[in-house]
Amino acid sequence: MSIKFKLLFPIFLQIIICFSELTAQDDFHTYYTTKSSDSFMSNKALQSQIDVSELQMHLLNAAIFHLTNLERKKEKLDVFVFNENLYKSSALHSERMIVGDFFSHENKRQRKWRTPKDRIFFYDDSYRTVGENILENFLLDYTGKTLRYRTELDVNGAVVYINPEGEVIENSTYLVLAERLVTQWMNSPPHRANILDRRFDLLACACDVDYDKTPVLIRCTQNFGSFQFPKK
């Protein structure tokens, strides 16, 4: 490598990183503003297996959002409109749950973000009604309510997860994981009630992962809201 290239390489690398970040930001808004929930499901990227080292979190969050809207459509309800401030509060809580290693609607470590209302109103205090769903699960592809596995080490010393039938458990695709997470909420009466609540017309979803957990743990937050007064 020549001296000139060595000097220019960091600049080239920074340009590539900035371009990637801008592309991801473009995808973030495109996922919510240019496609219906039905058409979003045809995104081929949803069929790709999750690579923990290159997790496309915006894609997963959007898949959860659109699958939630499809549940609304099944009940002939108006679909949710994406709201960026609700996205910020959802991302905040999922990140705080991972960093603080807790799973609760209440953040006991930071008073200003203690309750769902505190977190949502931190970004916009003009909502007339708000709500929150949370969940935790894993990135692995499994069926049933409970993940059952044992671990082994492969030839490279990496942990491999083995199901009771002796088969390797791979990571889910983005679509399969999003479907499992939304189904988890829909199978829980209070979470289902939020998803199908006519008072809410705004929604955002955001997840975060704990790479230190074995298997890798994912925690997600849905924040609901409306600028309208609750219907009586």
Image (cartoon, rainbow, N blue to C red):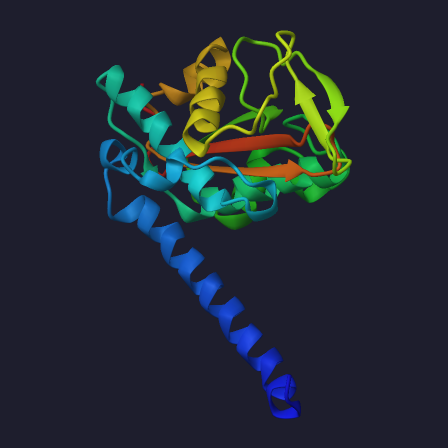
Q: Give whichever of 178, 215 is nearer the camera.
A: 215
Tally of numbered tags: 0
Query: Looking at the image, is 133 positioned above or below residue 39?
Result: above
Q: Residue furthest toward the bottom? A: 4
Image quadrant where one finds the N terminus: bottom right
Q: Residue at x 64, y 42 (%)?
A: 95
Question: Residue 170 vs residue 127: left or right?
Answer: right
Q: Image quadrant of residue 103?
A: top right
Q: Residue at x 69, y 27 (%)?
A: 160
Q: Image quadrant of residue 26?
A: bottom left
Expressed as whole percent of the image width and height from the top left, the position of residue 158 reads 74, 35
Expressed as whole percent of the image width and height from the top left, the position of residue 8 reads 59, 86
Expressed as whole percent of the image width and height from the top left, the position of residue 75 reads 26, 15
Image quadrant where one finds the C terminus: top left
Q: Give whichever of 86, 118 is nearer the camera.
A: 86
Query: Looking at the image, is 151 positioned above or below residue 34?
Result: above
Q: Residue furthest toward the front? A: 155
Expressed as whole percent of the image width and height from the top left, the position of residue 87 reads 47, 43
Q: Residue at x 61, y 7 (%)?
A: 165
Query: Looking at the image, is 91 positioned above or below residue 154?
Result: below
The answer, for residue 228, to whether it is visible in the render is yes
Q: Image quadrant of residue 112?
A: top right
Question: Residue 121 vs residue 216: left or right?
Answer: left
The answer, for residue 200, to whether it is visible in the render is no
